[in-house]
Amino acid sequence: MNSIFQSYPAHPWTAEWTFEPRGCGTTSREKNTGYFFHTTETVGRIRPNLESPEWSLQLPIPQNSRINLLFNGFCGYFDQDKHTISAEVIVPEPGVLWGRFSNIPAPVLLSDLPSVETEEGFLWLESDTTPALFAVRDETFCLVTKARIPADGVQLAESYLEKDLEADLSAEFERRAGAVKLFEEMNQHDSLAVISTECMMRALRPPEGTIPGLWSQSPATDSPHFNANELFALALAWRHIDPETAEDLVRTVLKVQTSSGAIPITYSPRESFSVLEAPKPLIAKTAEKVWQVRKNPQFLDDIIQPLRRHLQWLLHHFDPKRRGLHCWQNSNEPLAPEIYESDLATVDLAVLLLTEIEALNRLRQASPAYADNPPCFEQERDSLEDNLQNQFWNEEASQFCNAIARGKMVRLKGFPAFVPLLWEKLPFRQQAAVLDRIRESGNLPGGVSLLSWQKSALDNKSFPLLQQLLVLETLKTVDPHGTLINGFARLSLQGFVEWHTLSVEEHGILQIDPVTAAYIIVLQETYSQRNQDRGTLSSLVFKGFRKTRTDWYDIAVVVATILAVASVHTIYKQLHRPPPLITLEAQMNNAYASKDAEGTVQAGMAIIKHYPEQSAMAKLMTGNILLIQHRYEEASTQLADVRKEYPDSPGPMIALGLAYQLQGRFPEAEANYAEFTYLFGEIFPDLAATVQKYSYLMQEGFNSPPKWTDIYRYQLMHEL
């Protein structure tokens, strides 16, 4: 039996996790919720999804098994001697639990209810409320809970026992293939990513009622609703897991618009809603990011006209009197609702509308059917840009702090002042000023401190998800090389990991809704892609970092300096002067901890060039990277300089010895190895044994010890 999900990251077994079928619509859920299943505290024990269940099913897998929790089933694996204990279970339809097992006894139905063996291998559990038919055959089992008489249960169970379960399990695994690309071999991060994927899958609903396409259940209410303001996060996440799902979600939002182009914020299969409130101006930007994944021409043809109609409605909604000044019309519309007052025009609204127009026009130009058409809303675009530059920018304060309320200029503080960075064409001078202000204050506009905000507090909602996601997307605009993005993603991911761990380990519950899950997936993809872009040469150096949980304070300190690095580095680059030492050190440390080989060497060499008297750590980090990159002579030059300044430091002794050995300079290598063994043999016996092996191999004429890069797992190799 193939263990289908054994390569998929694990997640701890959790009580009250519900198993339900894929593609279950609202009506079906209401009728069949009692035919779903949920977990208990005991690993492998499942009950019907009822308040007072009369029975439970126990799969006898070890309590410390490796678990894969799926929204529609679970897998458990335990390696024992030369064989693997396994159990794999899915819910293919309401009232059916179908699975298989290996190297363990058959599952057992636990109950005080009377039972009857209707025929060989089929057990009927008699109950007025929750009857069950349980069948086992050749290490495959089927539990049927929706049959009211034994014959119906036997017939349904037979149909599943004769089917190929492995094909269905493989299909389930393939549906998660997009998520597999996001994994980082970091247990807690990957565990969070897989459970986030399952939460998003669980929330999907098929077309029904007045909703003409695929939609996602909003976590804001228990009743069936889709929220248009959640599309931004959901679609950005689904484009990495399943781009077709992302496209369908965008189509659905655009299809529910009225003839005038208005899109209700929330809508349900059975209800109609007011369109007095506008959704966040993000739909065109969302559609563009989704389209960029597959460049699907049909998707482009489907969305351009609905997008144009909706954007026309948005522009009129925010400027009904056509004054050329767009104002928030409802207290729920602003990104930061606390700023709202009537007839208020702010910079963030101008930027959001401006970038919507530009996204629509880029999509139009990519479509053969519309490419020759004139630009959409060119006059409105020019007006928005003029307001951005001449109305909302305060020259004296060097920030976007102006707003217009009821015709009067007022000062505006908070998150909106950050949003202009989302516009790719923002002049450099203004971009640098905004970033520099963040560096000086240590906070994002709005007062969110990068040193104090932590998601590990379960009730902490001080930094709304939409704002966090916009920060991430904005950083991609102002930081195309990824220094800012990677740091922000690492900081945020670590906060969510702590929050998730606290939920599971201390509270025994999962608190991830589909929108939070979507943001986690976007963070994971951002961080994962950044690491992949750096290549593999330096990955061995940082393998230890990936396998351990970095201290929160260390991460916070690094990220707090990242924004400073970006702004200061950009300014000094323009002035052709070297950035300050503290800036280069922060850049080098962040690059080194993030496995960015090129960034480490670049920053390290800048320190060595411009600040030679304070460059010992830069030479060590640069030497380590050069060694991994097989640039042995250059590495030995840097490491030899370190040894002159720090002759008693153990890490450089070993590194320089390796650099010499790899070049065939055996006498010099032996001198370094012998010194390390003499000074530190009793303190670091494991390392001393490894160094002695290197020395022995060198005596035999070998200049490249096997797996020599593994020595960089020791922390002292990275320290002076």
Image (spheres, rainbow, N blue to C red):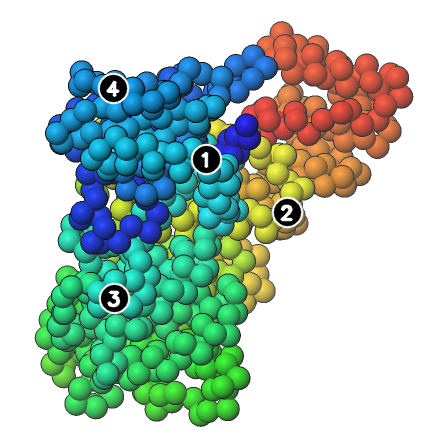
Amino acid type, residue under disc 3 in the picture: Ile
Q: Quarter-wise, where is residue 397 in the image?
A: bottom left
C-alpha span from label 4 to label 1:
23 Å
Is residue 429 found left or right of 591 in the rendered image?
left
x and y percentages locating residue 129 in the rendered image: 13, 31
User: Which residue lies at the image location 40% right of the left edge and 36% below the top edge?
Assistant: 160
Per the model, the C-alpha gap separating discs 4 and 3 is: 46 Å
Q: Residue furthest right?
A: 701
Q: Choose mark 4 or mark 2, whichever is in front.
A: 4
Q: Are marks 3 and 2 in contact (CB under 8 Å)?
A: no
Q: Residues within 10 Å of mark 3 (few under 14, many from 20)?
A: many
Say which label, 3 or 2, has the lower sequence index.
3
Count residues near mark 4 (Cα–Cα under 10 Å), then give few for <14, some for 14-19, many for 20+. few
The amino acid on which the numbered mark 2 sits, given as a three-letter code, is Gly
Q: CA distance from mark 1 to mark 3?
A: 37 Å
Q: Amino acid at mark 4?
A: Val
From this view, report whether residue 458 is shown above or below residue 234.
Answer: above
Secondary element at image label 4:
strand
Work out whether mark 4 precedes mark 2 in sequence or the reverse, and give the earlier one.
4
Number of numbered discs visible in the structure rendering: 4
- Name the residue nearer the viewer: 183 or 571: 183
Residue 556 visible (yes or no): no
| Residue at numbered disc 1 | 162
Residue at numbered disc 4: 116
Which residue is tagged 2? 535
| Residue at the image position 53 percent from the left and 20 percent from the top | 84
Q: Position of residue 25 (x, y in %)?
A: 26, 54
Q: CA distance from mark 4 to mark 2?
A: 62 Å
Label 4 vs 3, first from the N-terminus = 4
Q: Distance from label 2 to label 1 (Cα)? A: 47 Å
